[in-house]
């Protein structure tokens, strides 16, 4: 009697501890995602998709984040008219401006860049394009870029279907 009651209480405490630990980990993850998303200029939801897609493509999170930071900087530099960055986008036939003349968002440009790199035949051309836009970490990003925008959308669908995306609202809390 007493022993089974004690086991029941202990089991309840372990359950509460596990849930508390999970919730704390989730809040830490949400906070980290928000900070990194702000640094990269992308939403928490998109960042999770990219990190998942990268992990499934054999690309580590640090390489992804580093490459996306450099990509964002290069978009800005191209917008300021910096020759090297302008050439990197133009070399792929990509306009960094939308129809209103405003700089396009990073996720939209990333999808187009992924499609262009995925369509290239030469590994050397792919490497050159990736480094030109993403810096040295661009080489590490090639397995992900080679999936094209469709590959990233497939990974996003997997995450959404699994209910595994922390929303922006949760990250803001």
Image (tube, rainbow, N blue to C red):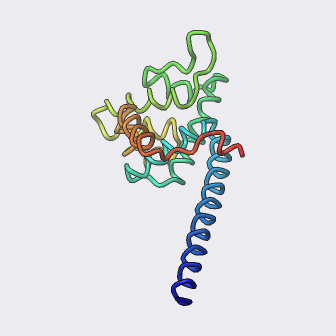
- Residue 72, given in percent of the width and then of the height, sits at 60, 35
- Residue 145, given in percent of the width and then of the height, sits at 40, 39
| Front in this rendered view, residue 127 or 75 | 75
**Residue that appears at 51% across and 53% down:** 61
Relative height, residue 96 to residue 11 (above, below):
above
Q: In the current view of this chain or complex, which residue is farthest to the top?
A: 100
**Residue that appears at 51% across and 27% down:** 109
- Residue 10, given in percent of the width and then of the height, sits at 58, 80
Relative height, residue 120 to residue 33 (above, below):
above
| Front in this rendered view, residue 21 or 125 | 21
Q: In this view, does 79 lie to the left or right of 58?
A: right
Q: In this view, does 111 lie to the left or right of 151?
A: right
Relative height, residue 98 to residue 18 (above, below):
above
Q: Quadrant of residue 113?
A: top left
**Residue that appears at 31% across and 31% down:** 120
Q: Quadrant of residue 153?
A: top left
- Residue 26, given in percent of the width and then of the height, sits at 60, 56
């Amino acid at each position: 009697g007493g022993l089974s009651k004690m086991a029941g209480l202990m089991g309840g405490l372990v359950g509460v501890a596990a849930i508390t630990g999970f919730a704390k980990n989730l809040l830490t993850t949400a906070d980290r995602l928000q900070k990194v998303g702000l640094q990269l200029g992308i939403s928490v939801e998109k960042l999770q998709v990219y990190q998942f897609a990268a992990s499934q493509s054999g690309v580590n999170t640090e390489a992804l984040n580093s490459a996306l930071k450099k990509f964002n900087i290069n978009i800005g530099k191209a917008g300021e008219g910096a020759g090297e960055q302008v050439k990197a986008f133009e070399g792929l036939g990509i306009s960094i401006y939308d129809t209103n003349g405003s700089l396009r968002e990073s996720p939209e440009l990333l999808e187009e860049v992924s499609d262009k790199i995925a369509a290239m035949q030469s590994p050397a051309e792919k490497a050159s394009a990736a480094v030109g836009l993403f810096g040295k970490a661009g080489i590490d990003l090639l397995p992900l870029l080679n999936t094209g925008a469709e590959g990233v959308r497939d990974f996003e669908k997997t995450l959404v279907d699994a209910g595994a995306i922390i929303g922006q609202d949760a990250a803001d809390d």
